[in-house]
Amino acid sequence: MSPVPRSRRARALGGLLALVLGLAGCTSAFGGEDVGDPAPVTVSGTPPAGRSDPATSPALARFYRQTVSWSSCGQGFECAKVTAPIDWKRPATGTFQLAVARTKATGKRLGSLLINPGGPGVGGAGWVKQAAGTFPDALRSSYDLVGWDPRGTGNSSPVRCLSDRQLDEYYETDATPDDAPEVQALVREQRAFADACRQNTGAILRHLDTI
């Protein structure tokens, strides 16, 4: 693939910004010394007023009651795929596979800690495998660390648009048109890009956003 000018690369990526989490603060919060067993946590099973628990919906029962099959994927982690609806409001629309990875608690387990590095557009399953060792021992002893690739990223039905060759041609489009023909060319390339994303990604594309 040919080198891409920085300005054009930035335009194509649309300002994608990966949020880097500072785990040093998390380490210092534990004081760097033995803090003993964490205090027990009381969890309420009551939904907010005026809302119902989606886990009780018959239409969503198969997603909440599914059995996840974990298998070793290296570095002391287990990986799996979880089935989720493309549209939670209309589960009959279809499903996709959500990629998850976890490392189990090393001591007395209290539960699972789900970790998302942010983004948008950043997968979390591979990230948690790289970052797990930086978490305090007290936390790792009590909680499974679980990372996942949000829908449309990583191995969770990632967005697919253009091939490498097509991207090369796309990057050659003048991003700062000076006349009507150049404006038309830019609009044409942008529409072709969007059409390719829709065609190569499928139905889930309409349900990918930061929400």
Image: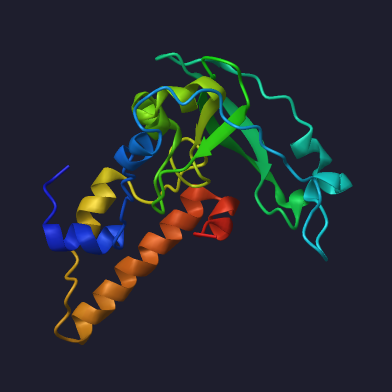
On the rendered structure, is 70 left or right of 9?
right
Choose top left, top right, bottom left or bottom right for residue 41.
top right
Frontmost residue, 95 versus 76:
76
Choose top left, top right, bottom left or bottom right for residue 30.
top left
- The percent coordinates of residue 181 (x first, y second) are 21, 81
Residue 79 visible in the snapshot: no
On the rendered structure, is 92 left or right of 6?
right
On the rendered structure, is 175 left or right of 30?
left
Residue 34 visible in the snapshot: yes
Question: Which residue sits at x=81%, y=64%?
Answer: 49
Question: Which residue sits at x=61%, y=21%?
Answer: 109
Question: Which residue sits at x=80%, y=61%?
Answer: 51
Q: Residue furthest right?
A: 58
Frontmost residue, 159 versus 74:
74
- 136 lies above or below 190: above
- The percent coordinates of residue 110 (x first, y second) are 63, 26
- The percent coordinates of residue 18 (x first, y second) are 32, 50
On the rendered structure, is 71 left or right of 51?
left
Choose top left, top right, bottom left or bottom right for residue 13.
bottom left
Q: Which corner quadrant holds the C terminus? A: bottom right
Q: Which corner quadrant holds the N terminus? A: top left
